Image: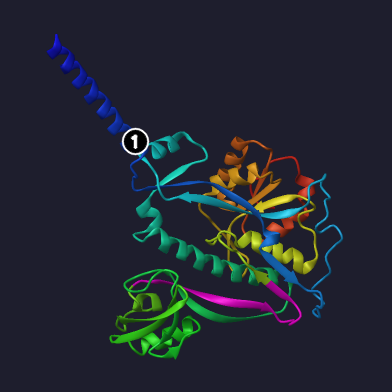
Amino acid sequence: MPGSDASGAAKAALRWGIAAAAAVLLFAVPVPYVLYEPGVVVPVDGLVTVDKTNRQDPRLKPDQPDLRAPSHGDVQGEWLLTTVYLEPRATLWSVVKSAWQADREAYTKKSVFQGGSAEEYKARMDVLMAESQSKAAEAAFRLAGVRYESEPVGVYVARGAGPLKAGDRIAAVDGADVDGLAALTDALRSRAGREAELTVQRGGTETAVRLAVDGADAETPADMLGGAELTEIIAVRPADPAVSVTIDAGQFGGPSAGLVLALHIYERLTGESLTGGRRIAATGTIGPSGEIGAVGGIKLKAIAASRAGADLFLVPEESAAAAAAAAEAAGGGMAVAGVNTLEEAVRLLRNYGDQEGRTMIGGS
């Protein structure tokens, strides 16, 4: 009957419409999540330059002949910086699928961006990378016994609050220059409970920001500025003017490159071949005294390092078990070792040949 045919066609069209709408919701409509996956693995040699050609400091030794020579089969030894890739646009299907994918992790945007935008998150990561670079250099200088000088070169906003945005450099308070946290603290305390004008450098330009400085009960500059997270960047350089250490991290951000940067700088300063011709990846925050701290995305970084052909992956001690499990699942035979300090990492690498061929969990 014509009526029945029309009714059947309408029902079929409705079913197709529902299916199409479901597919759009599942595969195309963004959800408030981000996805992390293994990122690129980059040789540190292209990011760090250590020039000691005309050195005067006797603690600075010439490179050993095999420092960059292929002494492990035909593979040239190198340090590898590991990263994770953040995909800010997730769909419901990609989030659900990540539950059974070893190389994907889903997190809410709120937990990652903490109320800010993707651009503010990137600015925060850039500030933390700059801080990590100076701490890595200082830790390497200390362990190598190299005399060095340091001075604050700026206070940056790592996480914004009120009119302050992540990435801002606070250059002055009411016209008085600010080069470090001590100067900023003094300037703000003298204006507690009143309004002040901050000169901030943002995106290559200077802008004036007026805000109320919290009262005398506030103990830190962050408290006085409404809870903004502040980071002081320190310039660290060898006392020998003929020696220079330059780091250009390019597009990479975050604090987790501290360990691998420090290892590379230490090796080049001392001339000691710690890689032994092997490809060694490393991740971990670092303090100026060489203490190693935890990082995020350790499983994904282990997968990335394994896929890149790393022989060994150095990680913070507390992350060693998780990294080793991820590396084993990824295959490739990469060893994993956990360390607590830069000195411990150097000691482990000196003895690495005696431990080769087995997965290590924990420092030595």
The percent coordinates of residue 312 (x first, y second) are 69, 47
Determine whether 281 is above or below 329 in the image: below
Q: How many marks?
A: 1
Residue 238, magenta (yes or no):
yes
Q: Taking 235 as reference, is 169 left or right? A: left
Q: Nearer the viewer, residue 65 or 168?
A: 168
| Residue furthest right as drawn | 65
Q: Main secondary structure of the magenta part?
A: strand
Question: What is the quadrant of the N terminus in the image?
Answer: top left
Q: Taking 21 as reference, is 301 left or right? A: right
Q: Quadrant of residue 228?
A: bottom left
Q: Residue at x 32, y 36 (%)?
A: 24
Q: Quadrant of residue 292?
A: bottom right
| Residue furthest front as drawn | 2
The percent coordinates of residue 279 (x first, y second) are 72, 50
Q: How is the image coloured?
A: rainbow
Residue 9, magenta (yes or no):
no
What segment carries the magenta color? 227-245
Q: Taking 314 as reference, is 118 left or right? A: left
Q: Which residue is mark 1?
A: 26
Residue 52 can be seen, yes or no: yes
The percent coordinates of residue 293 (x first, y second) are 55, 59
Residue type, label 1: Leu
The percent coordinates of residue 339 (x first, y second) are 63, 55
Q: Nearer the viewer, residue 51 or 1?
A: 1
Q: Nearer the viewer, residue 2 or 111?
A: 2
- Specify few, some or many for label 1: CA neighbours under 10 Å numbering under 14, 14-19, or 20 or more: some
SS of the residue at dot 1? helix
Residue 220 can be seen, yes or no: no
